[in-house]
């Protein structure tokens, strides 16, 4: 089959690789009909996440048709259309039973788990196409994928619903939903969202759906800010205003009730802390550019909540722990517990309560994935979200 493979920093290629096969009884093989590039893929493209090997197949946002099912799977059958969560989870362990599939203890094989245990103190859960720290699973920017525990994760899609409407159930819609849920929004609250990429845009939509009265969105790409505005947000261009001060003015001196960091480890901008972080990461003296995390902690109102869907991978200094403690803040974060949200979010799409397609800027054949990666990184203003089709 054809698949997009990683070969080092800023080097991804379309290769011909062996077709996946059923390995375990609960596996299914999916023929992929649509797959997307995520901001998280850029962390791999930019080589910020360790544990990648030459030839690894990328991609964790995908859906398709079931073409083969293991004998232990009574939930799926050939011909079913499914969206696959990016998180691989068993559905049975302590964490899955607590509805925390992104903390599943079984999906990262023991021989791979050591590295994530060293990096994070505990073993990370498996994920598709996301380095050997999360199991080294082949991803879904390919013609086919093997889906482990496929009786638990994938959600069946009724006939007649276009791929594009439901594809983002694989990641960014639940991620935006959990980012908003982590804000513990009370009706009428003001929520500030850093980053108007796909995750930030879904966080804006979901914050309103969960009762926010105002959402203030921060970025510097005019097109992405325009999308945020079209979704009801007031917008700030961080190249034009001082973000914390402006947020304070806009909220009668209080600060937003909650702040969402939908940027993560690759924050842009020329603030002094970001420049120091950039020097440190480029000389391997540091791992993450945590400017947005710092800014959310400083900007949120006293007693407020900071929600961090943005991915961080290592260590960060100058995080204002004093403000965090003295202001009595709550911090909530994590890889998204995708499986937990899927039935309710699919219902919302089918009921027409949310537009899940307005952020798609490009629809391309899978063969053009390498140039799509380059553009999604270098031309973020125009390239808001790319959907790839293997045929
Ligand atoms: N927690 C999860 O399960 C999960 C799932 C998906 C994605 N993510 C993470 O969410 C983050 C966003 O993903 P995305 O797909 O939207 O990425 P993206 O790269 O498309 O968007 C990031 C946006 O942040 C903006 N930005 C950069 N620096 C900023 C700053 N200082 N202030 C305000 N905005 C700034 C950029 O201009 C860009 O528009 C990434 O870190 C990604 O890895 C997490
Ligand atoms: Zn993703
Ligand atoms: Zn589990």
Image: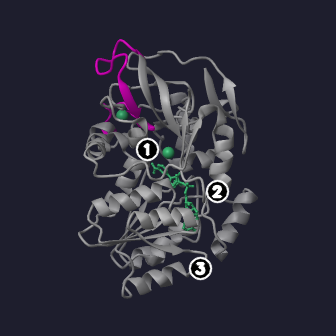
Residue 121 placement (x, y as % from top left): 50, 47
Q: In the rendered picture of this protein, how many numbered marks are placed on residues?
A: 3
- Residue at image position (34%, 35%) is 161
Task: Say what secondary structure mark 2 lies in.
Answer: loop
Q: What's the distance in space between the residues labelled 2 and 3, CA to CA?
A: 28 Å
Q: What's the distance in space between the residues labelled 1 and 3, CA to CA?
A: 31 Å
The range drawn in magenta is 68-95
Q: Left or right? Give the position of 76 relative to 9.
A: left
- Residue at image position (33%, 43%) is 100
Kindly identify which numbered label has been placed on residue 171.
1
Determine if residue 61 is in view.
Answer: yes
Q: Which residue is mark 3?
A: 240
Magenta stretch contains residue 207: no
Q: Nearer the viewer, residue 102 or 363?
A: 363
* Mark earlier in primary sequence (2, 1): 1
Q: Nearer the viewer, residue 247 or 112?
A: 247
Q: How many neighbours does mark 1 have within 10 angstroms: few (below 14), some (14-19), or many (20 or more)? A: many
Magenta stretch contains residue 85: yes
- Residue at image position (41%, 55%) is 202
Q: How many neighbours does mark 2 have within 10 angstroms: few (below 14), some (14-19), or many (20 or more)? A: many
Determine if residue 52 is in view.
Answer: no
Judge whether 133 appears above or below 375 on screen. Answer: above
Looking at the rendered image, the disc whose residue lies closer to the viewer, 2 or 3, is 3
Q: Is mark 1 within 8 Å of ligand 2?
A: yes
Farthest front residue in view: 160
Farthest right residue in view: 283
Quarter of the image containing the N terminus? top right
Kindly identify which numbered label has been placed on residue 287.
2
């Amino acid at each position: 089959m054809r698949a997009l493979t990683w070969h080092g920093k800023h080097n991804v290629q379309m290769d011909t690789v062996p077709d996946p096969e059923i390995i375990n009884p609960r596996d299914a093989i999916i023929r992929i009909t649509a797959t997307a590039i995520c901001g998280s893929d850029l962390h791999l493209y930019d080589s910020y996440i360790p544990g990648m090997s030459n030839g690894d197949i990328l991609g964790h946002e995908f859906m398709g048709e079931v073409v083969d099912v293991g004998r232990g799977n009574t939930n799926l059958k050939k011909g079913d259309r499914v969206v696959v969560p990016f998180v691989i989870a068993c559905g049975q362990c302590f964490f899955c039973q607590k509805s925390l599939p992104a903390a599943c203890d079984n999906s990262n094989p023991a021989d791979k788990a050591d590295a994530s245990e060293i990096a994070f103190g505990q073993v990370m859960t498996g994920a598709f196409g996301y380095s050997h720290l999360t199991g080294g699973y082949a991803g879904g920017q390919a013609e086919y994928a093997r889906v482990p525990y496929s009786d638990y994760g994938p959600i069946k899609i009724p006939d007649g619903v276009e791929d594009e409407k439901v594809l983002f159930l694989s990641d960014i819609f639940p991620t935006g939903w959990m980012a908003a849920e982590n804000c513990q929004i009370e009706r009428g609250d003001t929520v500030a969202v850093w980053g108007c990429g796909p995750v930030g845009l879904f966080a804006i939509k979901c914050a309103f759906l969960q009762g926010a009265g105002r959402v203030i969105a921060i970025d510097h790409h005019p097109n992405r800010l325009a999308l945020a505005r079209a979704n009801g947000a007031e917008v700030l261009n961080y190249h034009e205003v001082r973000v914390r001060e402006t947020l304070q003015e806009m909220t009668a001196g209080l600060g937003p009730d909650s702040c969402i960091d939908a940027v993560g480890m690759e924050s842009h901008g020329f603030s002094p802390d970001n420049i120091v972080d950039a020097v440190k990461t480029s000389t391997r003296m540091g791992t993450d550019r945590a400017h947005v995390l710092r800014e959310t902690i400083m900007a949120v109102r006293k007693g407020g909540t900071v929600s961090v869907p943005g991915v961080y991978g290592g260590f960060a200094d100058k995080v204002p722990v004093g403000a965090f403690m003295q202001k009595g803040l709550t911090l909530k974060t994590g890889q998204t517990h995708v499986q937990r949200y899927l039935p309710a979010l699919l219902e919302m799409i089918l009921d027409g309560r949310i537009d899940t397609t307005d952020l798609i800027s490009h629809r391309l054949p899978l063969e053009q994935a390498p140039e799509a990666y380059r553009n999604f990184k270098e031309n973020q203003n125009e390239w808001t979200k790319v959907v790839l089709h293997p045929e």
